[in-house]
Image (spheres, rainbow, N blue to C red):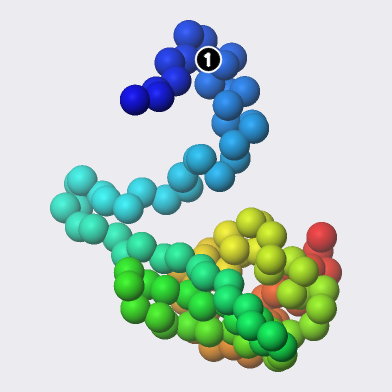
């Protein structure tokens, strides 16, 4: 086992800065409610002339964004970890239509 022991909070914060994806923003289990939250994940697939982002809830594919339906700037953003987090956050907020997701993506890119 290669467990890394942290001797100080300084080392722990240094590790978190180097590996920001190691932090989890959402709990998957709420002990007070005794409920399991669904696992939401994004998978990017590519083939010769196609690119897709698929959103899965637990093991079921629930939402697909076709790369041919969005601009190159939007594609570049969605290829980043921030883009994956954006898709997960918007999906969890209740957006389940491609047109609404594109509008939110355009707003987000204008702000940044």
Question: Relative to residue 29, is residue 23 depicted above or below?
Answer: above
Q: Left or right: where does residue 68 sit relative to residue 98?
A: right
Question: Relative to residue 75, is residue 17 depicted above or below?
Answer: above
Which residue is depicted at the point 44% across and 20% down? 4
Quarter-of-image position of residue 51:
bottom right
Which residue is depicted at the point 58% across and 26% down? 15
Q: Quadrant of the N terminus?
A: top left
Q: Left or right: where does residue 36 sit relative to residue 52?
A: left
Q: Can you give x and y, in whole percent of width and height, for residue 109 in the image?
A: 79, 68
Question: Foreground: 101 or 70?
Answer: 70
Report crowding for label 1: few under 14, some 14 to 19, many 20 or more residues within 10 A (C-alpha).
Answer: few
Q: Can you give x and y, in whole percent of width and height, for residue 62 in the image?
A: 42, 82
Seen from this angle, which residue lies furthest left? 34
- Residue 101 visible, this orientation: no
Question: Relative to residue 31, is residue 77 depicted above or below?
Answer: below
Question: Foreground: 24 or 42?
Answer: 42
Question: Foreground: 33 or 11?
Answer: 11
Question: Which residue is tagged 1?
Answer: 9
Which residue is depicted at the point 82% across and 60% down? 112
Q: Left or right: where does residue 53 sit relative to residue 104?
A: left
Seen from this angle, which residue lies furthest front? 48
Question: Relative to residue 37, is residue 22 depicted above or below?
Answer: above
- Residue 29 visible, this orientation: yes
Which residue is depicted at the point 34% across and 78% down? 60
Quarter-of-image position of residue 70:
bottom right
Circle 1: element type? helix
């Amino acid at each position: 086992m290669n467990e890394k022991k942290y001797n100080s909070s300084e080392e722990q914060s240094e590790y978190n800065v180097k590996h920001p994806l190691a932090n989890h923003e959402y709990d998957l289990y709420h002990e007070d409610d005794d409920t399991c939250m669904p696992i939401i994940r994004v998978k990017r697939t590519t083939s010769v002339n196609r690119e897709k982002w698929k959103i899965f809830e637990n093991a079921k594919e629930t939402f697909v964004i076709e790369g041919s339906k969005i601009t190159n700037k939007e594609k570049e953003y969605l290829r980043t970890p921030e883009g994956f987090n954006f898709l997960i956050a918007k999906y969890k907020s209740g957006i389940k239509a491609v047109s609404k997701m594109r509008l939110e993506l355009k707003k987000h890119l204008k702000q940044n």
